[in-house]
Image: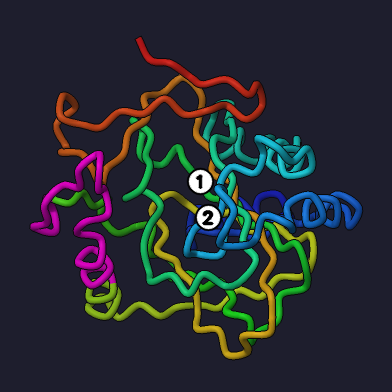
Amino acid sequence: MNEKSSKYHDFYEKGYVKLPFKLSEELVDAAVNEIGKNYNYGSADYNLNNRVENAWTFSRSVRQIASDQRILDFLAEIFHGEAFPFQTLNFEKGSEQKLHSDFYHFACSEYDKMVGVWVALENIDPTSGPLRVVPKSHKLPYLFPKDLNLKIGTKKNPYEYYKYYENCIEELVAREGMLSEVIVLQKGEILIWHSNLIHGGTPIEDPSKTRLSQVTHYFQKNRLYFTPIQSLKNLLFRRYRNPYNILTGQRIYHF
């Protein structure tokens, strides 16, 4: 199996893959410098997970990372069609987020046509709360709130019942006998994961350590997009969304 075939096999079989190339140090450093001042509680872009959401709107380098042609080419292969980035999240510290799948947050009408792409903006220290993934968990069923006997989140408070979802995912992983794998990347390295892959953060052992990183989410073009946490499975009762295409800076509108 050649290198190209191997990385596609890993993605489909394990649900994630590290790409065989790095982003340049110059680009990574520029992104860190452009966004660094926004990591504080007084910033409008900050939230409690130590991240800046959609920094691509003001950082040229964050947008360049999200628009890297080599990433887009890889996604075009696995999607069998063009992809576009629609959201960026830049982290200063480890999120310590509980296990979850991205599908529960945002989805495409063809469920597997969304991915997360994680880029290390520094050498990740094992004590900084690195990323963890659950190999092969993307093969589990795609879950809506109703599948877990949970109420649907409202537009005003979509995460009202989220802690119950997190508990359900922890129980599911334990019941299936699945184990987590901790991912420690070097500066500029790139990890791609499937929309349904269960993943999260690990505890921060050394609070003095940063875990500078960028997550970009991508959809396949020419699909319908919705928010499962606020949706039923029925096509008519979904919370549809009009995501940005970071490549153009414009929203994608459905008819």
Q: Are marks 1 and 2 in contact (CB under 8 Å)?
A: yes
Q: Amino acid at mark 1?
A: Val
Q: Residue furthest front?
A: 42
Furthest residue toward top: 255
Image coords of residue 60 (percent x, y): 78, 37
Give the vertical position of 183 relative to 34 (above or below): below
Task: Give percent across and percent down for residue 91.
Answer: 61, 61
**Region in magenta:** 146-169
Q: Is residue 13 left or right of residue 228?
A: right
Q: Earlier in the sequence, mark 1 or mark 2?
A: 1
Q: Identify which residue is drawn at 62% across, 30% down.
A: 246
**Which residue appears at 73% of the width and 57% of the height?**
37
Picture disc at residue 115 = 1
Between marks 1 and 2, how big is the CA–CA gap? 6 Å
> Which color scheme does this rendered protein use?
rainbow
How packed mark 2 is, by other alpha carbons closer than 10 Å (few <14, some 14-19, many 20 or more), is many
- Left or right: 117, with 181 as reference point: right
Q: Position of residue 178 (x, y in %)?
A: 35, 77
